[in-house]
Structures are given as C-alpha cells and as structure tokens.
Image (cartoon, grey):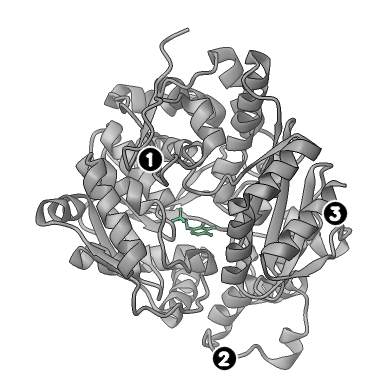
C-alpha cells in the first residue's frame, strides 16, 4: 500500500501524527484544535478534467486516494460506491446546471435528506465504521461508538441517515422541539434503523447544544457508557476532517463538468459562491483551489447573521455584541463559525497565532487578524450579506426570470454572486432542495415578507401539504423529492420530548440503551 498520509492539528497540541481513519473517529484534537493534512496533494489540470469521464463515486475515490487515506484502494472503491449510489435521486450525484449564461448552480441536494450535508454524511460514517473495525481488529479498541448530535435541523437528519445500521455505531439526535420545521421534525422522527434514537428538547437550539456538550464533558457518564455498554462517545460534527474531505471532491467534479459542457474553457478560472454558516463547504472550495482546481474568487455569502462577511471585510471577528437573528436560511444561522479556525491555520500555517485568536474569541468574544493574514484572506475571499427579504425577493426573481426555484440558502448565494461576480463564470453552490424550506419559498412566491405570517388557511397545512401550494405558484418547478412528499404518511417512531439540560440528556440516553 502507498504510504498513508498523516495529520496534525491547528493548535499544535497533538504530536501523534494520526492517519485519516484515526482523525475521523477522534473528531476534535486534544487541546481543542482541528486536524489538517500534513501535505495537500496536487492535481494537474489534465487530472481534474479526467475526473469528468468517471462516475461520481470514482471521482471521489480518486481524490481520497490522492489524499493518502489509510484504506486499501479496492475498499475505498467499495465504500464510495455505497456512499454515492442508488440512494441519490440523480445518478450524477452533484450535477451542475447552467441557469443563465455565466451562472451555474452546483446542486448538492439530491441525497436522501435533500440537503448538502448528505454529500459528507453519506460518506463519512462508512469510514467511521471502517475505522472502528480496523482498530478492533488490531486490538487497540474494545468498544463501539455512540454519536451524540445536537441539531437545528439539517445535520440531525443527515447524520441519522448516514449512520443508520452502520456496524459498531449508534447515534442519538437532540433537536429543539419547537425550533425545527414540520418537515424537518418528521424527517427525523421517522428515521429507520436499529441503532438510532431521536429526542425533542424543550428549548431552542442553544439549549439543546449546551445540554449535549455537558453530556460530552461528563466523565462519570463516559465511564458508565464504557463499563455497562462498551461504548465510547463521539460527535461527528462539521469540524471532523472526515466531513471536509468529501466536500473537496465536488469542486473538482464541478469544474470538470463545466469544462465538458462548455461553461468554462479548460484552465479558465471559475468563481464559486457558497452560502456559508460553519465555513465547512467553502473551505472545501479553498482546498480544491490549493490543489490545482482553477478557482478564482471564493465568495462567502452570509445571511443577516453576517459575522463572516464582516470578518472578510474587516479582519475582525466579533460576536461580543452581536445578536442572533432568525432568518429564512436557518442552517446558516451561526455565530461561532467553527471551520474558520482551519481556514486561518491553512493561510498562516502558524499554530501559535491560530491558538491565540481562538483563545481571544473564547475570552473576549472577538479577535483581529494581523495585516499579512488579512491580506491573504482578501486574496482568496470576497463576501457579502443578504437580508431576509432580499433573499426571498431573489427566489421570486430567479423563478420569474429563469424558471429555476432556489431554496432560501441558495438564494443568499445567488444574490451575493450577482452582486460580486466578475468576468469569469460563477458556480453558485446550492445547499438544499427548495421543498425542504417550503414555508419561506411560499412566502417568496406569494410576496409575503419573512417576518409576516402565512394566511390562516395556508398556515393550517402540514409542511408537505404546503409544498402543493408552492407548486401551484411555480407550476413548472421541480417536484418535491419523494422522501419529503411521503412524510405525512410515514410512521413516527420517536415521540419523547425531554427538558433541556445535562441530566435529562443523560437520562434519555440511559433509558434508550437499557
Ligand atoms: C449546513 C448548511 C449550510 C452551511 O454550510 P457550512 O458548511 O456550515 O458553511 C448551508 N445551507 C444548508 C442548507 C445547510 O444545511
């Protein structure tokens, strides 16, 4: 086997040089840093273009192999075929659609949960499970893993779908009982699988996350899980390198497809515009650029929670006095954008400085990068923020002008792309199917402001019934994916709602496991 690549962490605390399968299971490094590869592979233009000849699973396998993943190639192939197989509603997996000359949409929503998190979470759990099996076979691990997830909506369902019935894993998801849409809740509580559990939490997403974090930090609970259930805890959240690597693949794939379709001339750069929350998706684009995919500007599109757009404009990341705003794009409603740490480290390759900025953020709620780092940020990134009503107006306008229906997250990116695009073709990254966020898409098409309520008769509909109303307003738009359209008939398996807090979370897990 070729030499396995090794990893280090952004705060310089882990000297053990773990391989890919190790960092997937560890998630975060000791000391709180994030794992990054010691070296990035390089792809020639010819190699990028050659990907266009392959089915998607093989494009992914090629990139994983180049990253020195410590799994034999035939096994990588098998895992990738399983990750990017028939559960996708489009055999191209991540197709590119030219909506209007020069504006291309990379559709990342054809997976089983209709949001882009499937791109990573259909893949990463396979390596997670593989890694545990490898460690158990070596005799270095005796337990299986329990993954705890706090979710504001998309991540929970994508994690459930990814980990369901994966050997050596169990997954428990906690969501704010009144903080997710009807469709999002039904997606989660109808999840099949022997190793999954779903709990509603009384409170908002923050309460949910705080409670789950407290459970993680509880060493007595960890001891009990090991003794009584032979389980260790992990989180599988978006800072996990195993979620980032699959997100590099689709930028290379999209470029190859755009050259093949004539959307870009081989070698000419494309700009990419990404609706951003935790900075994971756009960071995949940065890595692809560094590896040789011809990408010009990386445009970071923020909603009204615009801490990232402000950072890219000023070099100051400041959440000390920032209020959390509710928007039509909830998966981007984030204050602490956790993958930004990895980006800053990659720009500077300086663990000391990176650790210093993160300490400052923890202690004072802000940090400011130095001039040279800011120059590097500006060299690669542009940014803009889009208000709630601007994003809804964009959905309406793109539908009226081009007959293409955007979800509210993608609309933020489309609007930013239109404002900031230069002469090169733009790839707008679409992160959700419109049907996943039907309420705000309905408001957009009906000319209702985000803050205003739906008319009474529409408000009384289930999330699924509302989709038919959207399709009445946008008759030639794409249909709702079948998995969403059938949710009202699906059997709800999980109905437990618990109080927010450390003790109720632990009690819920205990009861489930016993
Ligand atoms: C998670 C998510 C995002 C944000 O992606 P990041 O990698 O956190 O920047 C955007 N849109 C949708 C629909 C998502 O689910």
- Residues at badges 2 and 1 in contact (C-beta under 8 Å)? no
- Residues at badges 3 and 2 in contact (C-beta under 8 Å)? no
Q: Which residue is mark 3?
A: 511
Dot 1: what SS? helix
- The relative height of residue 68 versus residue 107 in the rendered view (above or below) is above
Circle 2 crowding by C-alpha within 10 Å: few under 14, some 14–19, many from 20: few
Position of 280 with respect to 470 (left or right) is left
Give the Cα distance between marks 3 and 2. 41 Å
The picture quadrant where one finds residue 47 is top left
Instruction: Of the two numbered discs 3 and 2 on the same chain, state the one appearing first in sequence.
Output: 2
Residue 25: image x %, image y %? 57, 34
Q: Nearer the viewer, residue 46 or 313?
A: 313
Give the Cα distance between marks 2 and 1. 40 Å
| Residue 54 visible here | yes
- The relative height of residue 463 versus residue 214 in the rendered view (above or below) is below
Q: Which residue is mark 2?
A: 452
Q: Which residue is mark 1?
A: 258
Identify the residue shown where x is 53% and y is 14%.
73
Instruction: Of the two numbered discs 2 and 1 on the same chain, state the one appearing first in sequence.
Output: 1
């Amino acid at each position: 086997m070729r030499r396995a690549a090794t990893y280090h962490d952004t705060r310089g605390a882990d000297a053990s040089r773990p391989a890919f399968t190790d960092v997937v299971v560890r998630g975060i490094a000791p000391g709180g840093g994030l794992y990054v590869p010691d070296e990035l592979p390089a792809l020639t233009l010819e190699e990028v273009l050659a990907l266009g000849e392959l089915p998607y699973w093989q494009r992914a396998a090629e990139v994983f192999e180049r990253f020195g993943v410590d799994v034999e190639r035939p096994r990588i192939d098998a895992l990738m075929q399983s990750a990017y197989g028939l559960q996708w509603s489009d055999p191209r997996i991540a197709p590119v659609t030219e909506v209007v000359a020069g504006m291309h949409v990379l559709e990342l929503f054809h997976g089983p949960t209709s949001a882009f998190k499937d791109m990573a979470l259909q893949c990463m759990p396979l390596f997670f499970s593989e890694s545990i099996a490898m460690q158990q076979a070596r005799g270095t691990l005796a337990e299986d893993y329990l993954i705890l997830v706090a979710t504001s909506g998309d991540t929970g369902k994508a994690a459930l779908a990814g980990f369901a019935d994966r050997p050596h894993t169990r997954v428990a998801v906690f969501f704010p009982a009144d903080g997710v849409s009807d469709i999002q809740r039904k997606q989660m509580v109808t999840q099949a699988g022997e190793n999954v559990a779903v709990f509603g939490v009384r409170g908002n997403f923050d309460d949910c996350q705080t409670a789950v974090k407290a459970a993680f930090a509880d060493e007595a609970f960890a001891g009990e899980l090991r003794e009584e259930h032979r389980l260790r805890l992990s989180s599988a959240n978006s800072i996990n390198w195993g979620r980032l690597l699959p997100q590099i693949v689709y930028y290379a794939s999209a470029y190859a497809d755009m050259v093949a379709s004539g959307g870009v001339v081989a070698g000419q750069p494309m700009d990419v515009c990404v609706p951003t929350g935790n900075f994971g998706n756009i960071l995949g684009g940065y890595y692809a650029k560094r590896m040789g995919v011809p990408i010009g500007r990386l445009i970071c599109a923020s909603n009204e929670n615009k801490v990232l757009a402000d950072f890219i404009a000023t070099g100051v990341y400041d959440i000390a006095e920032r209020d959390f705003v509710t928007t039509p794009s909830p998966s981007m409603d984030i204050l602490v954008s956790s993958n930004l740490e990895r980006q800053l480290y990659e720009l500077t390759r300086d663990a000391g400085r990176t650790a210093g900025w993160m300490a400052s953020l923890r202690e004072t709620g802000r940090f400011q990068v130095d001039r040279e780092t800011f120059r590097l940020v500006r060299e690669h990134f542009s940014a803009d923020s889009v208000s709630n009503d601007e994003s809804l107006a964009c959905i309406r306008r793109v539908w009226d002008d081009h007959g293409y229906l955007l979800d509210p997250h993608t609309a933020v990116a489309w609007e930013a792309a239109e404002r900031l695009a230069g002469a090169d073709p733009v790839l707008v990254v679409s992160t959700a199917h419109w049907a996943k966020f039907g309420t705000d898409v309905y408001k957009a098409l009906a000319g209702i402001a985000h803050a205003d309520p739906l008319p009474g008769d529409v408000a009384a509909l289930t999330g699924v019934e509302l989709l038919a109303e959207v399709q009445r307003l946008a008759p030639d738009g794409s249909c709702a994916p079948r998995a969403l359209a059938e949710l009202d008939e699906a059997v709800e398996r999980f109905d437990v709602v618990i109080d927010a807090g450390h003790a109720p979370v632990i009690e819920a897990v205990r009861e489930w496991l016993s």
